[in-house]
Image: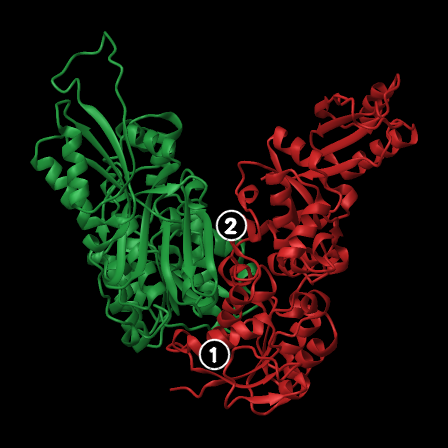
Chain colours: A green, B red
Amino acid sequence: MNSPLRLGIAGLGSVGTSVVRLLQDHSGNLQGDGGPVEIVAVSARDRNRDRGLNLDGIAWHEDPVALAQSDEIDCFVELIGGEDGPALSAVEAALSAGKHVVTANKALLAAHGLRLAEAAERNDAALNFEAAVAGGIPIVKTLREALRGNTISRIYGILNGTCNYILTRMELEGITFADCLADAQKLGYAEANPTFDVEGLDTAHKLAILTSLAFGTRIDKQAIFVEGISSIQPEDIIAADELGYRIKLLGVAQRTESGIEQRVHPTMVPKDSDIARISGVTNAVAVDGDFVGSVILSGPGAGGDATASAVAGDISDIARGDRIAPLGRPADQLAPYRRAQMRAHEGGYYLRLKVRDRPGAFATIAKQMADAKISLASIVQRNRRPSSSAPRSDDFNDQPVTIITHDTTESAVRAALQGIEAEGQISEKPQMIRIEKL
Amino acid sequence: MNSPLRLGIAGLGSVGTSVVRLLQDHSGNLQGDGGPVEIVAVSARDRNRDRGLNLDGIAWHEDPVALAQSDEIDCFVELIGGEDGPALSAVEAALSAGKHVVTANKALLAAHGLRLAEAAERNDAALNFEAAVAGGIPIVKTLREALRGNTISRIYGILNGTCNYILTRMELEGITFADCLADAQKLGYAEANPTFDVEGLDTAHKLAILTSLAFGTRIDKQAIFVEGISSIQPEDIIAADELGYRIKLLGVAQRTESGIEQRVHPTMVPKDSDIARISGVTNAVAVDGDFVGSVILSGPGAGGDATASAVAGDISDIARGDRIAPLGRPADQLAPYRRAQMRAHEGGYYLRLKVRDRPGAFATIAKQMADAKISLASIVQRNRRPSSSAPRSDDFNDQPVTIITHDTTESAVRAALQGIEAEGQISEKPQMIRIEKL
């Protein structure tokens, strides 16, 4: 029997607690192949908090960096979180000391992944991070190992449960973003400060990691076009439904002639597509490869237990002796990331304009679209029925106009909208939602 | 740079041809981590067939066994197919000679998997078979590696594209099984001899492998309850639709108190479940684990290119130096498979009876159900509207009766149906379709 892989776990929040529980309850699941696994030390902020764990015989470190470097351990499990601070210091210390690292920290990897991968390779250590993207869904392993024969053309997914929960409820209940967010916060599905989730930054971090794995490029989270879901109105969701679409916050990375597009934005997806059917906090990731075709993985994207499942898989690989370059290829063989400009993005667009009710407005819109060489798939004007009790306002007679374009470019759409705005034909900022072909 | 992993590929049908093409076109995808990969020899039945491949510089063997043992190769890729015969002889020869083996052969593994796993372990060789189950979907890797921290309660899936294609078309077009099968054969989606697919045997082979990986038990394909789809009538599909279900051929392995259930049968699944939405030749596998919750993988279950993607992933793992026990745990640590008897299966049932139009028939049915302690969720009798042009027959007035039971046991349902048949109240063999809770 091999000597056990000695683990040091830093961070005993919901994920850390689940990881300890899994390893203690299910040690037999991990054994058998590769050596056994043993928790020898932990570190967390508050020693006295009751976590419902039996930590007898397990050393306690106040300082995660000291734990990371400790001779007691072979593998450091980082569940502290955060892009910098103790998580970064501890992971760096562990890798420098030649310890393997398992982390669930997407922010850390999106910011420092390349450098950490280099450090791991230099020190002959593993750096595994299945839990950093899409929780319990094994998308890192799928890209890094299972599908690596493929040349990947696109990867896209629902990577943030909070946003998908909000969009699903907005659709089912017809409520506004603000009301839905408030309720999600009450139920614990959204943070007190929801910006990171609802403005797409969390999705962007995960996408940055997936892009590197899928395309063999260096991680570049700065090069991601990011739009969140806070601008989505109930009328957009209704219009999408009528047109055969649902609105999802997607992270998409796509090979194009001019480079690799990375974008996070509310997206109209055909109702009968697999991704449209992912509801609530569930995550899903789809990969389009030249040999495999399209493969979709779905499951819980967050939560202590699901994340612990991914952490345990990573630990098991290390215990077995599997060593893979953290980003699939040695870091010095990763191609520089070549950004495709968002203005060159091609696809269909949904536009919702509030058009002033005055002569020539429609003609102006049609002309601006034609000048930008955009051909329209549909244009719908819905006359609002004034209710006698509704307060009259200046824009009472403004008409919501919904436009679906055929494939065009982002720059053409922006040019047309600028022209329409410049002519003063619309009374509020236009809504623009990209349509994804699936 | 490591010395290349030298491959010998036996079988150049559609999968073999795709594998050669992938390895030649995408050698860069596999390299970088682990050593490079090189095809040094192939074997196939007909040397002169034009496969559109450039085999210059690659040795040709008439005999796959000779190739498997050849000193030229490090890894034998078996794409011949078949449970016994040359595939078995060649894989045995390769493992005995200490060569790694990659195979796409589900029949071989379902029949001899345990013995081959032992041979691989004895000879310190890898035995990888991602392509044997669900084509391009990485379910073997997901079970064997990613989810191994979990205790799995159930795994189920749509594992045969032919059956799912037929059931999808029967549903969409309202045509009979026989018409649909004939069309599927014309289009190349079903074999000339379709028994293996439509009677559920192919699904059973794949399920036998998944069960071993999910539950850490020895493979036992004899212990699978198997029912195919040939008895499914358009009226069953219509009734399912009205009741909120779709009919899918599922392979299900489930932990129960009395052992592990393995069953393949047409199954009613809720229309809004993920598995219900898998249409056409697509495959899907769902895993319920205690930590991860429910994870679903879907994608192409067959086809040369998708299968080649899986084979390439397996080869890449070997090239990197990863060695895992073929069945996830050393073969001598696999638990004996303890079969749960199908009669003990618990769940809801759909029953369709053709009831003779005579006094007391309904009372008899109700009494038999009550005697078997089966409680009914619904019972529907549909009076057929006789068309004046339809030929009259003896059972012209027989009434189709559709019953949905609450949870009960297979033995109770069988007892009730036997009682009803014994009393002569039904004019043809009853239809019974199990309902799966998802």
Q: Is residue B331 above or below residue B384?
A: below
Q: Nearer the viewer, residue A388 or A60?
A: A388
Q: How many marks?
A: 2
* Residue closest to the far top: A388
Amino acid carrying label 1: it is: Ala
Left or right of residue B404, residue B372 in this image: right
- State the residue at coordinates (59%, 92%): B71
**Which residue bears the numbered disc 1?**
B319
Place of residue B400 in the rendered image (x, y in percent of width and height, measured from the top left)? 77, 27
Give the answer, above or below, for where A252 lies relative to B231. below
Which one is nearer the viewer's eye here, B404 or B236?
Answer: B236
Image: A6 above or below A246 = below
**Disc number for residue B296:** 2
Cα gap from disc 2 to disc 1, whole angstroms = 28 Å
- Give the answer, above or below, for where B335 lies relative to B326: above
Whether callout 2 and callout 1 share a subunit is answered: yes
Q: Chain of mark 2?
A: B
Q: Residue at x 17, y 22 (%)?
A: A398
Q: Is residue B273 left or right of residue B434?
A: left
Which of the two discs, 2 and 1, labels the residue nearer the N terminus? 2
Percent x, y of residue A147: 45, 65
* Secondary structure at numbered mark 1: helix
Residue B309: x and y in percent read 49, 67
